[in-house]
Each structure stands twice: as structure tokens, then as C-alpha cells.
Image (cartoon, helix red, strand yellow):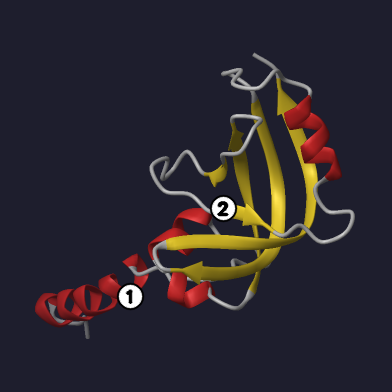
Amino acid sequence: MMPRPCVAAAFFFTLLPLAACRTIGADARGQWRLCDIVSHPEAAEGQTVTFRAMIRSDGLEHTVLLDEACPKQGIVPSSFSAGAGAEVSTAVDAFPPGKRGKRIDALWTGVIQREGRMIELRVTDICDVHVSKP
């Protein structure tokens, strides 16, 4: 006996929202998405997270981690642990201050903290650094 079309359709449309819903948090590799962190910082606050991001810095004082999928939102890297960040600092310092067009991508690990609306990453590790020159 074949299922009735309306019963099959009801079953399908009941499960459809579950398939479209994405959970906020780490994926199967243990990595987060920067866009998820900035959209739902309460889900990551106080946790050690790993995510891929590009660093935007003027080489002087303004530095932010960004993702092209949500370019108007970012995370401020702060308080680098000993050894973390040497490769990124070298890459940032290789360009004159204020130079546009540099792109530095890396895999960032640290603890998420919030201070008001600002989201910070207390950096514990940076790896897989890629530099694209202008």
C-alpha cells in the first residue's frame, strides 16, 4: 500500500526546517566560523575557539580579524600568549604602515571574551599563515 501524498508531504515539510537549521558552534574539525561567533557571541564567550580569518591592520594600532562572508563584523585579537603571533607580526611589519592591499590569512585559536559590544580573542595560537602581497 502506497502512503498517501498528503501524509508524505506533511512528513517532508515537518523535517525540512530541521535540515535548514544550522547549529552554532564547532564543525566536525573543531573549527568555528567567525560569522557565527560575531552573530552569536554568547555561544562562544569564555570558550576556546579555532577559526580561519584574515587580519586587517593598518600596521600601527588598528587590527581586526575578518571573514569575507560577514565583512562588516570582526573580532579584535588581544593579549597574545608567548610565541603566538610572531609570524603574523612579521607579516604585518613587512608592509609600510597604512599600506592597503595586503592580505594575511591564518587559523586562529583563543578564548572569546566580550566587553560591551566589542568581541575579543585572547590569542593562544596562530598557524597556517598565508600572506598575499599587493
The disc placed on residue 108 is none
Picture quadrant where residue 134 is located: top right
Residue at 56 percent of width and 70 percent of height = 113
Inspect this view and state whether residue 29 appears: no
Residue at 41 percent of width and 68 percent of height = 116
Could you say whether the residue bearing mark 2 is in a helix, strand or loop? strand
User: Which quarter shows the N terminus?
Assistant: bottom left
Would you place residue 39 above or below residue 85 in this image? below
Name the residue carrying label 1.
Answer: 18
Indicate the amino acid at tag 1: Leu
Residue 15: percent from left, percent from top: 29, 77
Would you place residue 68 above or below residue 94 in this image? below
Side of 34 relative to 91 (left or right)? left
Would you place residue 20 above or below residue 106 in this image? below
Of the pair 9 and 125, the residue shown nearer to us? 125
Query: Farthest residue in the front direction?
Result: 61
Residue 8: percent from left, percent from top: 20, 78
Mark 1–mark 2 Cα distance, whole angstroms, equals 33 Å
Residue at 47 percent of width and 38 percent of height = 68
Query: Farthest residue in the right direction?
Result: 83
Decide: few, some or many residues near mark 1? Use Cα within 10 Å; few <14, some 14-19, many ≥20.
Answer: few
Would you place residue 109 above or below residue 67 in this image? below
Assess whether mark 2 and mark 1 are in contact (beta carbons under 8 angstroms): no
Query: Farthest residue in the bottom direction?
Result: 1
Image mark count: 2
Indicate the amino acid at tag 2: Val
The disc placed on residue 76 is 2
Marked residue nearer the N-terminal end (1 or 2): 1
Inspect this view and state whether residue 40 appears: yes
